[in-house]
Amino acid sequence: MTPFCRNVLLLVSLGIIASSGCVHRRLTIRSQPTGAQVFVDGKEAGFTPTAVDFTYYATREVRLVKPGFETQTFKVPLAPPWYQLPPLDFFSDNLSPGSVSDRREMRFTLQPQVVVPQNELIDRANSLRNEARIGN
């Protein structure tokens, strides 16, 4: 085999290896009611329903904010599938033929915001003030 053919074969082999294998990870977040602003790990991700791509499996912090509803924060564990466990992840990320898609979906129900009457707030404040004075 000539050096030229060897180099061409090497380049073709490297091209095939580089183009194979790919894992696409995506987390879709839905809420009831829809239209809540979503923050994933402190970064704005849009309004529900929305989807974000992720690279690493870990526990994510998802915060949902919507006027008239309680702001809610959830810890969402994203465990890796079997083909993403070491050392298999090297092969699925780099050498598997074609691409692999890992799609996760989380659904949340928002709770209506509770409005506390002003006189109840004042009573609680006075109660706490009295407890603080007694403690001194």
Image (tube, rainbow, N blue to C red):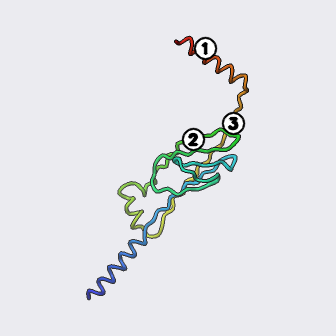
For the N terminus, the quadrant is bottom left
Q: Regarding mark 2 in the picture, which secondary structure is present there?
A: strand
Position of residue 91 measured from the top left corner of the image (x, y, whole percent): 38, 63
The amino acid on which the numbered mark 2 sits, given as a three-letter code, is: Thr
Upstream in sequence: badge 2 or badge 3: 2
Residue that mark 2 sits on: 73
Query: Between disc 1 and disc 2, whose residue precedes?
Result: 2
Residue 46 x/y as whole percent: 61, 53
Q: Do the residues labelled 1 and 2 touch (CB within 8 Å)?
A: no
Give the label, 1 or 2, closer to the camera. 1
Mark 1 is on which residue type? Answer: Asn
Q: What residue is rendered at 63% in x and 44% in y?
A: 65
Q: Residue at x 39, y 59 (%)?
A: 89
Q: What element carries label 3?
A: loop
Residue position for label 1: 130
Q: Is 115 in front, or is 89? A: 115
Given contact means CB atoms under 8 Å apart, are the residues at marks 2 and 3 in contact? no
| Residue receiving disc 3 | 113
**Circle 2: is it few (<14), some (14-19), or many (20+) Cα within 10 Å?**
some
Disc ID at residue 75: none
Q: Distance between the residues labelled 1 and 2?
A: 33 Å
Q: Which quadrant holds residue 3?
A: bottom left
The amino acid at mark 3 is Gln
Left/right of residue 12 with respect to residue 64 in the rendered view: left
Q: Is mark 1 on a helix, strand or loop?
A: helix
Mark 3 or 1: the one toward you? 1
Task: Classify mark 3: residues with Cα within 10 Å, few (<14), some (14-19) or many (20+).
Answer: few
73, 77: nearer the viewer = 73
Task: Name the spot of residue 57 as percent of width and height, x first.
Answer: 45, 52
